[in-house]
Amino acid sequence: MPGTTPTGTRAPVVDHGPRTGNKVALTFDADMTDGMLANLRAGRVKSYANLRILDLLERDEVPATFFLTGKWVQRYPDVTRRIADNPRFELANHTYGHAAFTGDCYDLPSQPVNELRGDVAKTFEVIKPYGGRQTRYFRFPGLCHDAATLDALAPLGVTVVDGDVVSGDPFATAWKPLVRAVLDHVRPGSVVIMHVTEANAAMTDEALPHILAGLRERGLVPAPLSEVLVGA
C-alpha cells in the first residue's frame, strides 16, 4: 500500500517528490471537528463538503489525493464513497477529529500525544470499508508535529506528508490570492495543500480551474500522491 513504512521506526516526513519530470500532487484536506459538527446541526453552515471540487476534478479527469478525517467520513459517507469509487483519487488519513497533538497549533482542539496512535488507527479503520485507492499516508492537522508525535506513529507504518505549496484557502475571501499562492511556488514534484471543506474554504472551487490552467501552461501534470512521491 502506498505510504507504508517499516513499523517500529520514527515516521518519515516528506514535503515533495523528486524535482524531475512534470508531475505534481493536488491534495485536499477534509477537516471535521466537534465544533464543525455543531455548526452543521445548528444550521450555522450548510456544508463542509465542496461537491463543486469533485465535479470539476471528475469532469476534467484530474487525479487528486484526499486526506480524510474520520468524523468527516462518518458525516459524509456518500461523498466518501464517491471519492473512493474514482480510480484517479487516493484516500489518506487526517486524524479522526482534526485535533492537534502538539501545543499551540493554531486554534485547533488538542489531544494528548499518547492518544495519537489510537486516533490515527481508528481513522484508518473508518476509511477502510470504502475501498478504492487507499494509502498509508498521514497528514497532521495544521502540519503541527514534533519528535514525540512522529515516534508515536512508529507502530503504524505510515508516511507523514506535509507539502511544499500551501494554498492558504482556509477562510479565504477571494480566489485570486489562492491561485497566486499555488502557481508562484509550484515546481515538479510539488505537493499542493488545499481543502474540500466548503464552509471553511469557500474560494477553493473558484480558484481550482485557474490553478489547473496555470499548471497546464507550465507543463505540469496532476498525478496521484503515490506517483509524485516515488523516489522521495
Image (cartoon, rainbow, N blue to C red):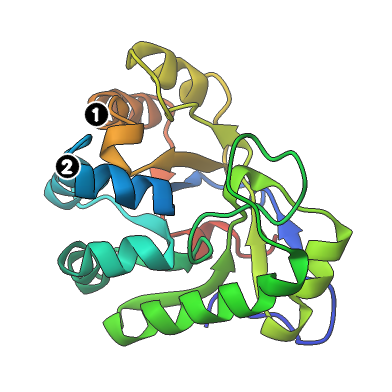
Query: With 106 as the anchor, is 215 left or right in this view?
Result: left
In the picture of the structure, the residue carrying the numbered disc 2 is: 56
Which residue is depicted at the point 58% across and 54% down? Answer: 99
Q: Position of residue 167 (x, y in %)?
A: 48, 29
In the picture of the structure, the residue carrying the numbered disc 1 is: 209
Which residue is depicted at the point 31% across and 66% down? Answer: 73
Bin the neighbour count of mark 1 within 10 Å (Cα to Cα): few under 14, some 14-19, many 20 and up: some
In the image, residue 144 sits, relative to residue 83, either above or below, namely: above
Q: Position of residue 113 (x, y in %)?
A: 76, 65
Residue 24 seen in the figure: yes
In the image, residue 141 sits, relative to residue 81, either above or below, namely: above
Which residue is depicted at the point 43% across and 30% down? Answer: 170
Query: With 124 as the anchor, is 10 left or right in this view?
Result: right
Q: Of 175 and 77, which appears nearest the observer? A: 77
Q: Position of residue 75 (x, y in %)?
A: 25, 63
Secondary element at tag 1: helix
Which residue is depicted at the point 54% across and 18% down? Answer: 184
Secondary element at tag 2: helix
Query: With 166 as the anchor, is 7 left or right in this view?
Result: right
Pointers 1 and 2 in contact (CB under 8 A)?
Answer: yes
Query: With 105 as the anchor, is 91 left or right in this view?
Result: left
Bin the neighbour count of mark 2 within 10 Å (Cα to Cα): few under 14, some 14-19, many 20 and up: some
Q: Which mark is residue 61?
A: none
Residue type at numbered disc 2: Leu
Residue type at numbered disc 1: Pro
In the image, residue 34 sits, relative to residue 160, either above or below, namely: above
Residue 29 seen in the figure: no
Q: Quadrant of residue 120?
A: bottom right
Q: Quadrant of residue 90?
A: bottom left
Which label's residue is closer to the chain start, 1 or 2?
A: 2
